[in-house]
Image (tube, rainbow, N blue to C red):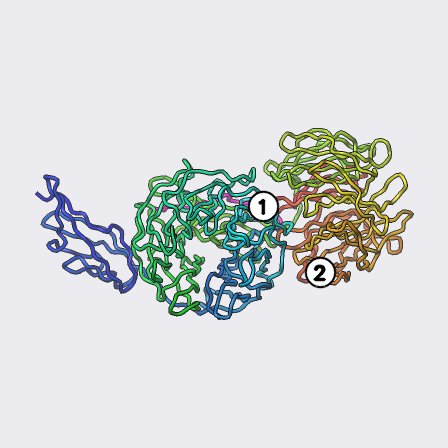
């Protein structure tokens, strides 16, 4: 007797005009099975969506869902069939390209950059506008490249790194600024590489790993710091590979898997931990593969699919990585083996696999359903292609761009895939956390979308699209490599929304443009140092305290709790010293004014791991009001300052490897209260200062670490000391304020161009300032805070916009202060601590955040 009928495939999805053959299998009371496809009675609950023949062949009619049923007497079985719009053509690239990058910008446009084409290695870039369905040119890359990476940074800019230009593997990197539509060089990779991975970490830095270099496969990795615009080496992969995948997991670690190495295709996998900058091997993939796709699912697992395991040998297998037990398990196979395909997580939680190559260039596409672990066909591309890009737009549609096939070469065509549904099955609600944020312009905040399903389970949704109610006040990222990061732009209270189909959740971001008090220092102090550690905490050390006494005490500020806690005490009382974060994470404290009323020669190291200070050699010449600059080679340049003989010219180098100081070249002019700025070209710009007896200096010079010598460069238009110098994202240096004996307190500013070696006047501040602070924000603007001048107590702060060269007022300090510190935090806020207040005639223990 017949007891049940099973209809397969279950939960199929097809595109318009496509067909799907269903099979009906009957199960009988004795356990036997029989194919009933040709004898069953077939029906479709929605013939307007899909019809079905008497032999179980369904034909798509219109987008939507229908239930397909097979019946035999009183027994029936059914499944759901989804009809999608499939792929439709949209605008065309100019020119066609392959191996390019595609990045979803915060304004909703998609940046297509570089790649290969019929004219060679491309410098051109284009923007796709979803509203218009067209591509328009934008600024050009400084270097043509393919097989590079493109990463949306938290500040809204795009980092382009490495690649190949037809003759050499590239070390150069560039930043695309959506506001200006231009590319500018940033720091260079330490190792030239192509086909590497680039992963934005939760701390805002970018992990570059592996790839192919001039000498073969690479194990090296490096970190890009958007604040400094530089790459620094981190630990190396355990296996040198190219064409591997890198996936940021919900716990903040990065999964590196597969690839091609010296031993052939690799099954190895490892985890990168940003907390200790280490790679740790984990269990192997079930199949060695390279050129596969890796997609973070809503359930937190990673889908590895397809790829190659030999020359021209593409794979149909797929597997899931489970972060909970660090294992890989097989899941359903692709219907067509493929490598060089794209994989896109849809709003509904399914994964779209499109195109690729398996001996033939593929037009087919498939959907992976995480709920049942199977792939089903879903329409076909209009043009077979591999090495294309795929980008999920804010409207839930997928943009497929460019690529290559043997008959047409590089492709200019683009296509759109519209899923039949945008909502994950049984999703009931979305909660966005944090639900309410208060911050100032430049503040960066990561938001998380958590979905609640009908069975009360929850998932951290990677598949939502993020939007801002007002992008002039707040930008929110929706790129697959950087999603849910809010960047405050201007004062207001915008709403940000996470959407998956017809379910959404929101949060508010109040942008204040003002200063709010945070926790107090344990000791009031002025002219202390403040150093942001690798763990995000800020080390406050020394300074003048109550009674004009130089403090030996130190404390740590924790941005997470907004509190200061006491840490170990320095071995010497110091103020007007320097503090430099070394590449090993320790802090070098050098010189300063001490208890003997003279410049100190001693130095010490602060170890964040155990919270202790230990002696670290001695300067050859004791000094204070000097500068300390971390060089690209890891050494620290100590320049100028005041000694027992007054202003001095000799400079010294601290070598962390030996823990010793050695003399290097001398400056052309003795000076103190000057500035020292590491330029993008590796030289150090020394400018302004005081030579003693109010002999203020306009001259500037450059220190070359390669030769250990100082050479004169252009001169400031106005001699100044106790000013600030800030390296801008465009490589120029902004000099602001200060004092000279002719004009007194200064409001003027100047820009130094490394390309010409000249200083030119820039905008004028609203207030004259000396002993103020200048902080480069993540949005590229410079925040000027505090100081004193002709107005004595300067409460208002100002923002310098490099794009216009002008200053605008932005909020006011609660306590006027000078000789304070200002520290940029990972969340984009600026913590201003201590200093001296003329208004209260006292050293300050208060701190504020902007």
Q: In the rendering, at what x and y percent does residue 775 appear? A: 69, 49
| In this view, the mark in front (1 or 2) | 2
Left or right placement of residue 408 versus residue 80 in this view: right
Q: Is residue 520 above or below residue 99?
A: above
570 within the magenta span: no
Of residues 419 and 617, the one drawn nearer to the viewer in this rendering: 617
Indicate which disc residue 438 carries.
1
SS label for mark 1 = strand
- Give neighbour class at mark 1: few <14, some 14-19, many 20+ (Cα, 10 Å): some
Q: In the rendering, at what x and y percent does residue 145 appear? A: 54, 62
SS label for mark 2 = strand
Q: Main secondary structure of the magenta part?
A: strand
The residue most toward the right is: 693
Viewer can see residue 160: yes
Left or right placement of residue 275 versus residue 82 in this view: right
Q: Residue at x 51, y 43 (%)?
A: 237
431 within the magenta span: yes
Residue corresponding to mark 2: 806
Q: In the rendering, at what x and y percent does residue 134 appear? A: 46, 68
Marks 1 and 2, how far apart in space?
26 Å
Left or right placement of residue 69 versus residue 715 in this view: left
Q: Quadrant of residue 50?
A: bottom left
Q: Which residues are magenta?
A: 426-442
Mark 1–mark 2 contact, CB under 8 Å?
no
Q: In the rendering, at what x and y percent does residue 418 appear? A: 36, 60
């Amino acid at each position: 007797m017949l007891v049940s009928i099973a209809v397969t495939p279950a939960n199929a999805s097809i595109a318009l005009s496509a067909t799907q053959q269903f099979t009906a299998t009957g199960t009988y009371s004795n356990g036997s099975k029989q194919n009933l496809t040709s004898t069953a009675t077939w029906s479709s609950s929605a013939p307007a969506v899909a019809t079905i023949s008497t032999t179980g062949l369904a034909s798509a009619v219109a987008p939507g869902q229908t239930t397909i049923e097979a019946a035999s007497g009183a027994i029936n079985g059914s499944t759901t069939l989804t009809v999608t719009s499939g792929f439709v053509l949209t605008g065309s690239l100019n020119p066609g390209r392959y191996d390019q990058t595609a990045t979803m910008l915060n304004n909703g446009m998609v940046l297509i950059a570089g790649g290969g084409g019929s004219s060679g290695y491309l410098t051109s870039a284009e923007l796709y506008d979803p509203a218009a369905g067209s591509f328009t040119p934008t600024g050009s890359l400084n270097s043509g490249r393919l097989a590079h990476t493109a990463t949306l940074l938290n500040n809204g800019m795009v980092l382009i790194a490495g690649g190949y230009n037809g003759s050499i593997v590239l070390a150069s990197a560039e930043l695309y600024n959506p506001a200006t539509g231009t590319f500018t060089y940033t720091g260079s990779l330490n190792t030239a590489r192509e086909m590497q991975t680039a992963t934005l970490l939760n701390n805002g830095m970018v992990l570059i790993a592996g790839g192919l270099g001039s000498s073969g496969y690479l194990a090296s990795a490096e970190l890009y710091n958007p604040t400094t615009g530089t790459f620094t080496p981190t630990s190396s992969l355990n296996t040198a590979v190219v064409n591997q995948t890198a996936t940021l997991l919900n716990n903040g670690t990065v999964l590196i898997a597969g690839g091609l190495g010296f031993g052939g295709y690799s099954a190895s996998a490892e985890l990168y931990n940003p907390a200790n900058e280490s790679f740790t091997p984990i269990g192997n993939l079930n199949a060695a593969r390279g050129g596969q796709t890796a997609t973070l699912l809503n359930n937190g697992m990673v889908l590895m699919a397809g790829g190659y395991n030999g020359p021209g040998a593409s794979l149909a297998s797929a597997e899931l990585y489970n972060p909970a037990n660090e294992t890989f398990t097989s899941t359903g196979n692709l219907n067509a083996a493929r490598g060089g395909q794209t994989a896109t997580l849809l709003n509904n939680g399914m994964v779209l696999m499109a195109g690729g190559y398996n001996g033939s260039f593929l037009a087919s596409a498939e959907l992976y359903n995480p709920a049942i672990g199977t792939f089903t066909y879903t329409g076909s591309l209009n043009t077979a292609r591999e090495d294309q890009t795929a980008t999920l737009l804010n409207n839930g549609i997928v943009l497929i761009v460019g690529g290559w096939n043997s008959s047409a070469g590089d492709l200019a065509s683009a296509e759109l895939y519209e899923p039949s549904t945008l909502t994950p099955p049984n999703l009931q609600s979305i909660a966005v956390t944090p639900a309410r944020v208060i911050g100032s312009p430049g503040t960066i905040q990561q938001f998380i979308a958590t979905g609640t399903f009908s069975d009360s389970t929850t998932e951290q949704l990677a598949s939502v699209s993020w939007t801002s109610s007002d992008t002039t006040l707040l930008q929110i990222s929706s790129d697959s490599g950087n999603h849910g990061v809010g960047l405050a732009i201007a004062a207001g209270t915008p709403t940000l929304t996470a959407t998956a189909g017809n379910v959404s959740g929101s949060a508010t971001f109040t942008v204040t443009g003002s200063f709010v008090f945070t926790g107090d220092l344990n000791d009031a102090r002025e002219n202390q140092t403040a150093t942001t550690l690798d763990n995000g905490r800020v080390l406050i050390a020394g300074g003048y305290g109550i009674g004009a006494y130089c403090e030996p005490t130190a404390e740590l500020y924790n941005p997470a709790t907004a509190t200061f806690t006491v840490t170990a005490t320095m071995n010497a009382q110091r103020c007007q010293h320097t503090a430099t974060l070394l590449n090993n994470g320790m802090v070098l404290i050098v010189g300063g004014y001490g208890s003997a009323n003279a410049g100190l020669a001693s130095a010490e190291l602060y170890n964040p791991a155990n919270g202790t200070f230990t002696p670290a050699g001695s300067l050859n010449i004791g000094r204070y009001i000097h500068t300390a600059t971390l060089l690209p080679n890891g050494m620290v340049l100590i320049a100028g300052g005041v000694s027992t003989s007054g202003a001095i010219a000799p400079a010294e180098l601290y070598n962390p490897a030996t823990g010793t100081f050695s003399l290097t070249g001398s400056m052309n002019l003795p000076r103190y209260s000057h500035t020292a700025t590491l330029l993008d070209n590796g030289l150090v710009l020394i400018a302004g200062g005081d030579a003693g007896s109010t002999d203020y200096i306009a001259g500037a010079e450059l220190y070359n670490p390669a030769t250990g010598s100082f050479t004169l460069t252009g001169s400031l238009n106005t001699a100044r000391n106790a000013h600030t110098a800030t390296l801008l994202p465009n490589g120029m240096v902004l000099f602001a304020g200060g004092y000279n004996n002719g004009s007194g307190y200064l409001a003027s500013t100047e820009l130094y161009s490394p390309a010409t070696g000249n200083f030119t006047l820039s905008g004028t501040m609203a207030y004259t300032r000396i002993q103020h602070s200048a902080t480069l924000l993540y949005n590229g603007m410079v925040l000027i805070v505090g100081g004193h001048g002709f107005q004595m107590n300067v409460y208002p702060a100002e923002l310098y916009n490099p794009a216009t060269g002008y200053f605008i007022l932005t909020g006011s300090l609660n306590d006027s202060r000078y000789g304070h510190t200002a520290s940029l935090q990972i969340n984009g806020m600026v913590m201003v601590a201590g200093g001296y207040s003329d208004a209260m005639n006292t050293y300050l223990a208060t701190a504020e955040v902007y």
